[in-house]
Image (cartoon, helix red, strand yellow):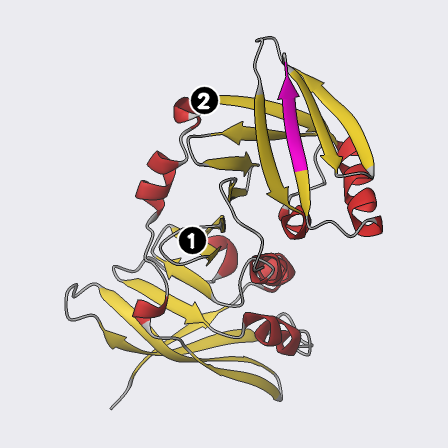
Amino acid sequence: MANKLKFKIKGENFETFISRLDELSSIDDTIKLKIDNQHILMYSMLGGNVLLAFKNFLMNTKDVFDVEDFDYKLDIIIPNSKKFVKNLAFLKDQDKITLDVTYKESPDDEELYWARAMQISSGKFKVTWLGGEHYEMRDIDKNSLKQRLDLKNRKWSFSISNSDFLDVKKLSNINADRIISISVVKGLVTLSEKSAWELEIDKLEEDRNSNLILNKKFLSCINDKVDKIEFNIFDTFMLIKDDNSNLMLSFEQDFSDD
């Protein structure tokens, strides 16, 4: 007999929950949810041994689900997440949405359940989805993530205003180059596309020189609803944080086969 869990989803936060799944699907088409009594850690990543991009959101469990306290942890892997999100758009009555999860217990952790399948229902409409295998995605917990992305470990940072960032996004759609160059010369930070355009965005207090590259396809993953966007530079990646998410992008990439 299959093990099952049932959750009632809070309608007032359903659109936020789905919009975040949609954002994560732009990184990769497989998303992982790690649910415990306090939080829902949602993330997607691109790359195998070399992590090219990673984005996560952290939501309070009781902001999404109408549940009492529980003592288990639930891992859900959502394959084909773009199609999953599009199907969920047909859920009409957001006050009556439920999530049913069929799971198996982890052989290594009696408190951990692995989702095998899930069904989201609202009235007469249901979306049924098979879950991915637990080994399909690297397992990252919220504590190790917090340590890895601690801003105390960054080497330096620069920022770009909202208006400049929106201009960069528009410019990137005009020109065919797949990367944006980030050049720092004596502290002056400039973004550019080869033989097309160049924009000065920041002036650092330190006399730094550096050259980085950014894949244009990840511009859509950056939150452009804030006044200023800060790029935090670590040893091998850049991190863009806001109140709800982390976006980590490798800047040591070879885009020749992308």
| Vertical arrangement, residue 169 with respect to residue 29, above or below | above
Residue 188: image location, x then y, percent? 68, 16
Question: Which residue, given by chain and number where applicable, does mark 1 sit on?
Answer: 41
The secondary element bearing badge 1 is classed as: strand
Q: Residue at x 36, y 37 (%)?
A: 148
The secondary element bearing badge 2 is classed as: loop
Between residue 126 and residue 108, name the one nearer to us: 108
- Point out the stretch of residues depicted in magenta: 181-185
Along the polypeptide, which appears first: circle 2 or circle 1?
1
Residue 190 appears left or right of 3 = right
Q: Amino acid at mark 1?
A: Leu
Residue 197 appears left or right of 78 = right
| Vertical arrangement, residue 153 with respect to residue 33, above or below | above
Q: Residue at x 76, y 23 (%)?
A: 200
Q: Residue at x 39, y 25 (%)?
A: 153
Disc 2 crowd, CA 10 A, few/some/many (<14, 14-19, 20+): few
